[in-house]
Image (tube, rainbow, N blue to C red):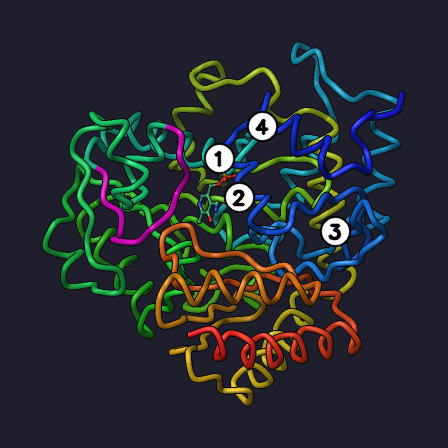
């Protein structure tokens, strides 16, 4: 079967306009109406043969695109047993869960697989409720997804306002402020935080914050959920943001990179004690496609490949190279450059400057993301497999884009 619109930007735009979203089509027109057709490693290829360096991808592509180890595992699974009956036992799910338990902080042994990051958040909210934790606490500028439960935690007026009322009894505290958290935590609370805020604009909390959060939650008997959907699996140059301070939350949320960049999958990983309600009754929280063998094959291959190719250390080294290189360019309209590993934020003077940067970088073939909760922060989440040539491409593009943006404002 061929896709009829393939190759024609005008035809694809028309399909978007008529059947997907006019808003999305408008956005595409503003960015030149580029069409992506294939991808390999750090590169995405356009309909006209153009090659892009993918430093965006919303944090999914730590392994790059179409990594052969993941693709081969998934293709083999597709050919043998892509979807499970859910009545019989399926071995790949067991192996994927064991692989996660082997790399997550000690004590996090139980995994509930889901299909998206937001669903991982939902599962955590429900598990906490099953323990009587009915009050939710998250942080200002935090991002935990847009399904209705997760949205109650995602502290952004723009996304919440049209959908209220959301879940009751949700408090948002300033991020990085343990004293503020201590003031609201009680035994009926479930605290949900990112170890570094991604969509909030790459906000790095003060040293000791995660330790304080863990101590406060334990002292009060509250649940501590660490959302590592963006920061986990090596993105920060460590396996987990939790490793920055050697904390073990009750629940760890994983997503994005777990897909290996090939099949959507996410997970909620919990301690034995936290998991007890789902352990007792496996039908308490279910979803037809959760833990499908194709997703499990991708997750298993992703975790194994990150370990086998030592990509956590590579993310640390590469991240420092990029941070140093970007800082040495020091453009006038960029007010802050910060990051950990391969999660890097470029804070610009305002969202218009950020938008201009994204377009100028796109002109130079470099894909980056804006931050969903902080529109003036451009986010770089490149793969851990960038070559020296890719690094030069990115830094040259940033220097040239900086000069071009300066001329516009
Ligand atoms: N939590 C965090 C920290 C995220 O960065 C995201 C996605 N940006 C989500 C949750 C939601 O994940 P998804 O978009 O897969 O639902």
* Residue 315 % position (x, y): 64, 69
In the picture of the structure, the residue carrying the numbered disc 2 is: 27
Image point 68% across, 38% down: which residue?
96
Measured Cα–Cα span from mark 3 to mark 2: 37 Å
Is residue 377 shown in magenta? no
Q: Which element is circle 3 on?
A: helix
Q: Is residue 105 above or below residue 332?
A: above
Identify the disc placed on residue 17. 4
115 shown above or below 216: above
Q: Is mark 2 on a helix, strand or loop?
A: helix
Mark 4 or mark 2, which is nearer the start of the sequence? 4
Eye-nearest disc, 3 or 2: 2
Q: Residues within 10 Å of mark 1 (few under 14, many from 20)?
A: few
Q: In which quarter of the image is the C terminus?
A: bottom left
Q: Who is closer to the viewer here, 267 or 380?
A: 380
Whichever of callouts 1 and 4 sits on the residue coming sooner in the sequence is: 4
In the rendered structure, which segment of residues is drawn in magenta? 136-147
């Amino acid at each position: 079967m061929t896709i009829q619109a393939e190759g024609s930007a005008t035809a694809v735009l028309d399909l978007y306009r008529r059947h997907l979203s006019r808003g999305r089509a408008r956005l595409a027109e503003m960015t030149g109406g580029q069409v992506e057709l294939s991808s390999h490693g750090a590169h995405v290829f356009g309909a006209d043969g153009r090659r892009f360096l993918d430093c965006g991808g919303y944090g999914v592509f730590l392994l790059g695109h179409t990594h052969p180890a993941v693709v081969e595992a998934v293709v083999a699974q597709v050919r043998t047993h892509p979807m499970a009956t859910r009545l019989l036992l399926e071995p790949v799910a067991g192996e994927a869960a064991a692989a996660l338990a082997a790399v997550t902080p000690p004590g996090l042994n139980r995994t509930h697989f889901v299909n998206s990051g937001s669903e991982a958040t939902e599962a955590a909210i429900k598990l906490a409720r099953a323990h009587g934790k009915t009050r939710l606490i998250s942080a200002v500028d935090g991002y935990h997804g847009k399904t209705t439960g997760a949205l109650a935690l995602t502290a952004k007026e723009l996304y919440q306002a049209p959908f209220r009322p959301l879940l009751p009894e949700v408090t948002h505290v300033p991020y990085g402020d343990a004293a503020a958290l201590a003031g609201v935590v009680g035994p009926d609370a479930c605290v949900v935080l990112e170890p570094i805020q991604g969509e909030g604009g790459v906000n790095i909390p003060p040293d000791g914050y995660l330790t304080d959060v863990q101590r406060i939650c334990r002292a009060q008997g509250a649940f501590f959920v660490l959302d590592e959907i963006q920061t986990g699996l090596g993105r920060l140059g460590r396996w987990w943001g939790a490793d920055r301070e050697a904390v073990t939350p009750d629940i760890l949320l994983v997503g994005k990179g777990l897909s290996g960049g090939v099949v959507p999958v996410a997970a909620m990983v919990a301690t034995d004690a936290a998991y007890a309600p789902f352990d007792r009754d496996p039908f308490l929280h279910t979803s037809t496609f959760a833990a499908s063998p194709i997703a499990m094959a991708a997750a298993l291959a992703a975790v194994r490949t990150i370990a086998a190719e030592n990509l956590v250390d590579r993310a640390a080294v590469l991240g420092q190279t990029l941070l140093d290189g970007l800082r040495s360019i020091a453009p006038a309209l960029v007010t802050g450059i910060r990051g950990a590993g391969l999660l890097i934020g470029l804070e610009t003077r305002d969202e218009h400057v950020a938008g201009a940067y994204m377009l100028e970088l796109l002109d130079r073939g470099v894909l980056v993301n804006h931050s969903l909760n902080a529109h003036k922060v451009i986010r770089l989440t490149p793969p851990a497999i960038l070559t020296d040539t890719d690094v030069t491409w990115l830094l040259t593009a940033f220097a040239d884009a900086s000069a071009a943006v300066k001329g516009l404002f």
